[in-house]
Amino acid sequence: MYYKENTIIFHNGKFVNAPKAVSDLYGQTLHYGYGVFEGIRAYQTSKGVKIFKAREHYERLRRSSHMINIPFGFNIDELIEVTYELLAKNKLTNAYIRPLVFCDPNMSLTRPNKVSIMICAWEWGAYLGDKQLRVMVSSYCRPHPKSTHIEAKACGHYVNSILASTEAKDKGFDEALLLDHDGYLAEGPGANLFFEKFGKLFTPQVGNILPGITRATVIEICRELGIEVREGLYKLSDLQKADSAFYCGTAAEVVGIQSVNNKSFVVPWNESLSKLVQDAYRLRVVEKDYSKLLVH
Ligand code: PMP
């Protein structure tokens, strides 16, 4: 599903055939989840294929590496360039791009001497689908920021995400919602949360969440459209009293939340501020004008 016989990936400075690419089974990343990655999207725009916020993503990859002591010797301009080349070689236009920095064989619990990078891409539709989500509050909380650098997009953090998402799906929901260790709203397993109340948007502050690039884009869009956004510590009861809510992330884009623990939001999706943000985001990623959506 992710690659075919002739798919090309970028691996340590070279473009290689995906089915023939090899990695060491003694790698520290494979054994301990000690690696960092990114999720990026490219879109077909009227000016050709554009990687959305490529620099921000690769800068976060570098920050994530540094935060968890993984050496990052890659040049960001070069990474952006090879990513465009990778898309062209695979004839991809609307694509999801996955760079991964992974560590050499090392069975001890110490920083690696050498790391590898691989970048692959494939065509991927809306990660959480197009319809609004039925969300369940997870029995798992997000990792404590004193247990790890929660702002790093580290491989091992996704054990928590997989547990939460699987639990929600096993119980018949579409997705999980995780609280932080103090019981405040945090985020989804792979997306940030916003909710609407009194004509304003609210989102959990950074500190216990992955600071999403889509989250930052939503805040930018709202500033341009004259929608007030507040960042803070919010409780589940704040969300349950909200008018509408959405998840946002590179893979998920902006996706509406229909209900939390089977309690539905009151404002019809099409009349919500959340829907307006969804429309604006869809235009923004393909570099189309969304100023006509202004709501002053
Ligand atoms: N939170 C988590 C836990 C994520 O995995 C993601 C996806 N990277 C996000 C939030 C959203 O981040 P972004 O908008 O940068 O994709």
Image (cartoon, helix red, strand yellow):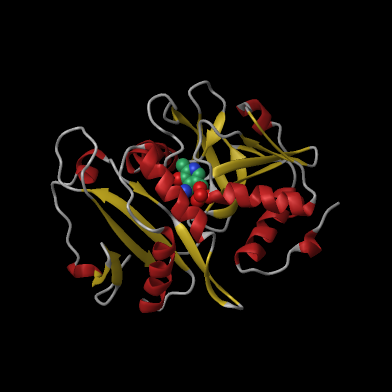
Q: Reply above or below: 168 against 79.
A: above
Q: Quadrant of residue 89?
A: bottom left
Judge whether residue 268 can be spotted in this image.
no
Q: Is residue 63 left or right of residue 104?
A: right
Q: Residue furthest top?
A: 182
Say how many tags the image has.
Answer: 0
Q: Is residue 34 above or below residue 128?
A: above
Residue 95: x %, y % from top left: 45, 67
Pick whichever, 27 or 159, lies toward us. Answer: 27
**Residue 44's image quarter?**
bottom right
Q: Which residue corresponds to the image point at 86% horizontal and 51% vertical from the top-left?
A: 296
The residue drawn where x is 68% and y is 60% is 279
Q: Find residue 262 and report its horizontal and vertical position in percent.
A: 58, 37
Question: Residue 208: where, in percent of width, then height?
Answer: 51, 31
Residue that lies at the very extreme toward the right in this rendered image: 296
* Residue at the spot 77% in from the left edge and 54% down from the top edge: 225
Task: Please indicate whether residue 49 sits to the left or right of residue 67 in the image.
Answer: right
**Residue 180 appears left or right of 295:** left
Residue in view at x 61 percent, y 48 percent = 216
Q: Is residue 47 left or right of residue 142?
A: right
Q: Residue 143, how many percent across, how many down?
A: 41, 29
Residue 30 in sight here: yes
Which quadrant does the N terminus fall into? Answer: bottom left
Q: Nearer the viewer, residue 154 or 5?
A: 154
81 or 127: which is nearer to us?
81
Give the answer, above or below, for where 133 lies relative to 111: below
